[in-house]
Image: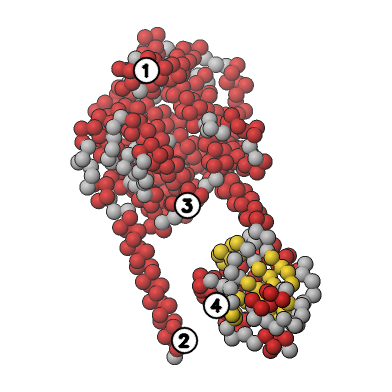
Amino acid sequence: MKNHFNHQQDIQHTLSFVKNFLTDSVREVNPWNNIKIMHTNLKADFMSGLTVAIIALPLALAFGVGSGLGPAAGIWGAIAGGIFGGIFGGSKVGVSGPTGPLMVQLAAIMVAFHTVSGELDVVAAFSIVFLSGLILVGLSMLRIARFIYYTPYSVVAGFMCGIGVIVMLLEFNTFLGVPSAHNVKEAIKDVPYALMNARPESLLVSIPTFLVLFIWPKITQKYSRLQALPATLIALAIGTTIAKVLDLNILYIGEIPTGLPTLHIPEFSKFGDYFLPALSLAGLTIFDCLLTCVVADQMTGTRHSSDRETFGQGIANMAAGLFGGLTPATSTMNTVSNIKTGGKTPMASVFHGLILLAVVLGLGPLAEGIPMACLAAILLKVGINILDYRIIPVLHKLPFNDMIVFWSVLLITIWQDLLVAMGVGVALAFFRFVQEISTAYKHQISYLDKKEKTHYNLDETQEKVKLLKPQGPLFFGAVDSLVRSYQKAAKHHILIIDLSDVSMLDLSGAYALEDLVNDTEAKGIKVIITGASSKIEKVLESVKVVDHLGKDHFLEIQENKIKNFNPYKIAG
């Protein structure tokens, strides 16, 4: 009857926990947190939104072309990110849109999805984008996004440098005017061919465009009145003007659909096929977004909500999938521009999306004459900017372990897969951490002297009493060192395991402790466990270790006296 009552209590506690968890999750992602402040900075937010839209337009077009889904997909991704990311996001100043890493990832995913005629399967593409948004919404409810802060810097740096190299490799052919490569491996093999077959007409556009992107920031430093004009817009205008004036026979963007978007209904029947690609896209989106949010926090002195940001980007991705847009994420370039130009509320992001919407609804034909070489130059500069210039100058001085992680992530990112690279990098860093933490604490093992026997209320005449005192966290990574420490102990009759210096205990540690007691007592050695804190004791009770060993093995030290302990009984 008592067991039934306890079982009912456990069910009630579980249901109560789930209810409270879901309630807190829904409260955290509530868009009212953003909506209620949108009216407080309208004029400055509008000007900031306009500036960011001007900066984002050429990038959105370039990202759309680079993904293989067309320039319109880039713009609709920016629109969905700006409006829905602004309303539902977790950063007040974050601005969402297509980004270089996500363009690369989506392009890599789409290599496996083609129609019978050999064209990219756009239905599959936008279904994957939609599903990635659905996954992001689910992850936001689990409230795990905050763990982005635990990603080692060597992983982040290798990842970002790898993406930068990928962007540059994929745009190299187009920059030189030769047919673009379909993937990174093909781009690497094509480098000699591209260099030998570069077209002068394309170089007349790509080289000046590329140079302007470097020179313009220096010009604006000298002439501050020009700072309102972004380098990407000036470079785009100059490159397009050169092609127009010289009437160059090169590739152009071509027709951009205007008007309301065509809805792309997801293929729910194929979600099984799309799940893993969508999961990789969702994982990269979280990483891309939250790193930018951390940068924004440092610039503004605020702190974003990681879970709400994940939720907001999930909604934005679902909208992008429906409207035929690229995967949006919180863009570092757009966000920094927004902060620098006075944006202070999510309304700036919404304005940015609405302005781009106006472009698509009426001004699309203006972008049709943009040369592909011009966009390639812009993306090449984006790839250069993505590289981590904090770590590149000190690569040769990195600690050996960080160097292994950095180069592993970098090479796997370039040659294999972005998400695999992230997983491998985190795994390498994690195992190294476990190795370090497992050897950082030296478990104490020694015979008790007379004074220590008195402390544990033992008879001073009792011979061969060993004290095993584990140090620090007793978890799966530290179990082996604890067992090996005890195996080296000399012969004894009694073992006291003092847990007073154990800071945490997981399931592996608890069961290792139970096995140690059983194995030791099988050799005729009496074992007593003492000093467990209430937190450690709770773990031991919850996983039934106390029940399995028997309560007579567990004692409490209070004022240097052990309760319920008869040393003479043990000695006998």
At horizontal 41% and vertical 77% (from top left) the residue drawn is: 11
Q: Amino acid at mark 4?
A: Gln
Residue 558 circle label = 4
Q: Within the image, what quadrant is residue 458 found in?
A: bottom right
Q: Which numbered disc, 2 or 4, marks the residue that appears first in the sequence?
A: 2
Q: In the rendered view, would you say 341 is above or below 314?
A: above
At horizontal 55% and vertical 65% (from top left) the residue drawn is: 504
Front in this rendered view, residue 295 or 106: 295
Query: In screen coordinates, is 162 left or right of 39?
Result: right
Question: What residue would you read off at disc 3?
Answer: 147
Q: Amino acid at mark 1?
A: Thr
Question: What residue would you read off at disc 2?
Answer: 3
Residue 19 point in image, percent of width and height: 34, 68
Q: Amino acid at mark 3?
A: Phe
Residue at the outermost right position: 491
Question: What residue would you read off at disc 1?
Answer: 220
Q: Which numbered disc, 1 or 2, marks the residue that appears first in the sequence?
A: 2
- State whether residue 76 appears in this view: no
Q: Which numbered disc, 3 or 1, marks the residue that appears first in the sequence?
A: 3
Q: In the rendered view, would you say 452 is above or below 478?
A: below
Residue 50 point in image, percent of width and height: 27, 29
Q: Give me the C-alpha separation between circle 2 and circle 4.
A: 31 Å
Residue at the outermost front position: 451
